[in-house]
Image (spheres, rainbow, N blue to C red):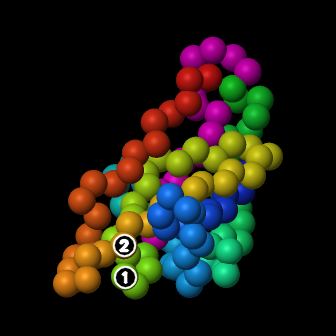
Amino acid sequence: MAATGTILTRVFTSRAQIPVAGATVAFTQRSTEGRHTLLALRVTDANGRTQPVRVGTPDPSASESSGTAEPFAVCDIWVESPGYELLVVENVQIFPNTQTLQELELIPLPEQSATLLPEDPVNVPPQNL
């Protein structure tokens, strides 16, 4: 990986997009064996945003010819905050020399629930390039 891109998140709740401060956001990458490697751990600020995370990406010239590998890196994002369901977003694309903002909506837990595991992770499909 010869280049870098950055990713940051904005965590919110409800259609009113109320920021969730103090949420823990983990950025991971999966190996070919399926194991997660932690890239960074961030906590959201009062606006629900994290500080940027630098991620190694393929060199931009790698995408100039057909049949080459995807011109972006991928990471998974795990978000946890008390009173909300755990959110897992898979295959978020980070492009070289680009800042990616991933919007993350948390769903409040029912008052009597202690469930922390997500029902289904969100999968971001590759872009048609």
Instruction: Check disc 2 and report the residue beneath it.
Output: 108
Position of the C terminus by quadrant: top right
Instruction: Check disc 1 and report the residue beneath it.
Output: 83
Q: Nearer the viewer, residue 2 or 5?
A: 5
Quadrant of res 108: bottom left
Q: Amino acid at mark 2?
A: Pro
Q: Amino acid at mark 1?
A: Gly
Tell me if label 2 and label 1 are in contact, CB under 8 Å.
yes
The answer to whether residue 30 is left or right of residue 101 is left
Task: Specify whether residue 72 is painted magenta.
Answer: yes
The answer to whether residue 64 is left or right of residue 111 is right
Image point (39%, 61%), residue name: 88
Crowd tier of the residue under label 1, counting other residues whose Cα lies within 10 Å: few below 14, some 14–19, many 20 or above: some
Image point (59%, 72%), residue name: 19
Q: Nearer the viewer, residue 41 or 23?
A: 23
What is the spatial separation of the Cα atoms under label 2 and label 1, in whole angstroms?
Answer: 6 Å
| Residue 88 shows up from this direction | yes
Give the vertical position of 13 relative to 67 (above or below): below
- Sooner in the amino-acid sequence: mark 2 or mark 1: 1
Image coordinates for residue 62, horizontal then vertical, percent: 70, 29
Image coordinates for residue 47, horizontal then vertical, percent: 68, 74
The answer to whether residue 120 is left or right of residue 126 is left
Image point (50%, 58%), residue name: 15
Image point (58%, 44%), residue name: 93
> In this view, which residue lies farthest toward the top?
66
| Label 2 residue SS | loop
Q: Which mark is residue 68?
A: none
Q: What are the residue bounds of the magenta stretch?
A: 64-79
Image coordinates for residue 87, horizontal then vertical, percent: 39, 64
Quadrant of res 72: top right
